[in-house]
Image (spheres, rainbow, N blue to C red):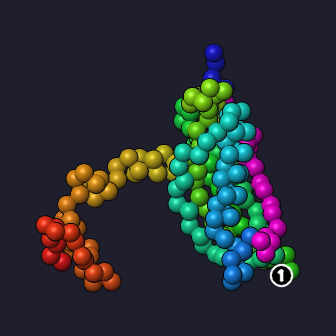
Amino acid sequence: MEKVYKRVSDAAITLTELMLPSHSNFSGKIHGGYIMSLMDQIAFACASKHSQKYCVTAAVERVDFLNPIDVGELVTLKASINYVGNTSMVVGIRVEAENILEGSCKHCNSSYFTMVAKDKSGKNAQVPGLILESKEEVRRYVTAILRMQEKKHQHPAFDEKTFEMADYAFLLRDKPIKLQLGEGENLEI
């Protein structure tokens, strides 16, 4: 069967929602968890639209909350496919909030969701390839590849089986910590 390819624009989705008091915390700012939920929904919709399959979230990378969102602001989430593999897709999401009284807009959040397509039996399913039509789409695709390569080559300190405290004691100097290690565990900092 011949490989199918789709444009990035074929699955791009925009979602806009008014932020209500029920979405906020006690200071009138919108809960980050609520925004994360919207991001997961739009990532699902975008990936499912591209793959024409049910999709599940496999990973969420770099959720940076750049600016708070207030009650009464219009939040717009924009999602597009940045990368495709055999069965997975990376969905890039940008979150903006608009103060409708002032007409001002601010970038609040960006993130990358790795979504995996599933067939009817729950097994990973092939996804269509991606047609890249602009320098920006190529940049996003290459950036996704580099992020995946970086993730594969994580620092050895992240490996709990080979981690040696003494190798990283210098990082703990002048930090607001108190070491109360178990019996037999020692660390000079």
Mark 1: which amino acid? Glu
Residue 170: which quarter of the image? Answer: bottom left
Number of numbered tags placed on the structure image: 1
Asked if residue 14 lies in the magenta stretch, the reply is: yes
Residue occupying the point 83% across, 81% down: 102
- Label 1 crowding class (10 Å Cα cut-off): few <14, some 14-19, many 20+? few
Report x, y in % for residue 160: 28, 54
Residue occupying the point 54% across, 53% down: 60
Q: Residue furthest right?
A: 101
Does residue 118 appear left or right of residue 61 in this picture? right
Which element type, helix, strand or loop, lies under badge 1? Answer: loop
Does residue 47 appear left or right of residue 187 in this picture? right
> Which quadrant would the C terminus be assigned to in this image?
bottom left
Asked if residue 35 lies in the magenta stretch, the reply is: no
Along the line of sight, the residue nearer the viewer: 4 or 186: 186
Along the line of sight, the residue nearer the viewer: 11 or 73: 73
**Residue matched to label 1:** 102
Report x, y in % for residue 130: 63, 36
> Which quadrant would the N terminus be assigned to in this image?
top right
Along the line of sight, the residue nearer the viewer: 178 or 59: 178
Residue occupying the point 68% across, 64% down: 34
Residue occupying the point 62% across, 52% down: 92
Does residue 174 appear left or right of residue 86 in this picture? left
Report x, y in % for residue 159: 29, 53
Q: Residue furthest front?
A: 183
Does residue 182 appear left or right of residue 94 in this picture? left
Instruction: Give above or below for 5 relative to 58.
Output: above
Q: Which residues are magenta?
A: 5-22
Residue 133 visible in the displayed image:
no
Residue 56 visible in the displayed image:
yes
Report x, y in % for residue 89: 59, 41
